Image (cartoon, grey):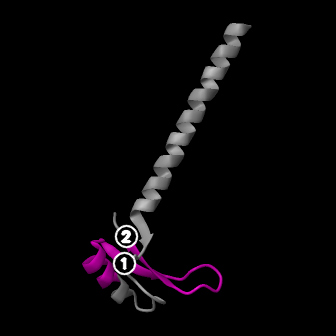
Amino acid sequence: MAKSKVLYSAFLATLFCFLIASTEMIRVEAIGCETPSATWKGACVVTEDCDNQCIKWEGAIHGACHLGFGWSISQCYCYFC
């Protein structure tokens, strides 16, 4: 009986570790690819301007304007992967 509790606890601990590791990997990938521009100020209206600024100023691969949620203004997002 004691052995089965130890095995069950070890199984749950291993499962929990895999769950946390997979969640961290997803979060890191999401943060690394698309981030709000650090140099853009104000509303983003022209995607080409955002694209040029992300490439030239921030070293990104691509940039694009995205409308925020609700009534928020559009923002410039830079893509690094």
Q: Is residue 43 left or right of residue 58?
A: right
Crowding at dot 2, Cα within 10 Å, few <14 / some 14-19 / many 20+, comes out as many
The x, y position of residue 70, in whole percent, is 65, 82
> Which quadrant of the rendered structure holds the C terminus?
bottom left
Relative to 21, residue 58 above or below:
below
**Quadrant hosting residue 77:** bottom left
Mark 1 and mark 2 in contact? Answer it, CB < 8 Å.
yes
Which residue carries the number 1 mark?
A: 63
The percent coordinates of residue 49 (x first, y second) are: 34, 89
Label 1, secondary structure: give it: strand
Q: Is mark 2 on a helix, strand or loop?
A: strand
Region in magenta: 51-78
Q: What's the residue at 29%, 71% (across, down)?
A: 61
Q: First in sequence, mark 1 or 2: give its number.
A: 1
Question: 61 left or right of 37?
Answer: left
Instruction: Tell me the quarter of the picture where residue 31 sits.
Output: bottom left
Residue annotated with mark 2: 79
Q: Which residue is drawn at 52% across and 85% down?
A: 74
Amino acid bearing label 2: Tyr
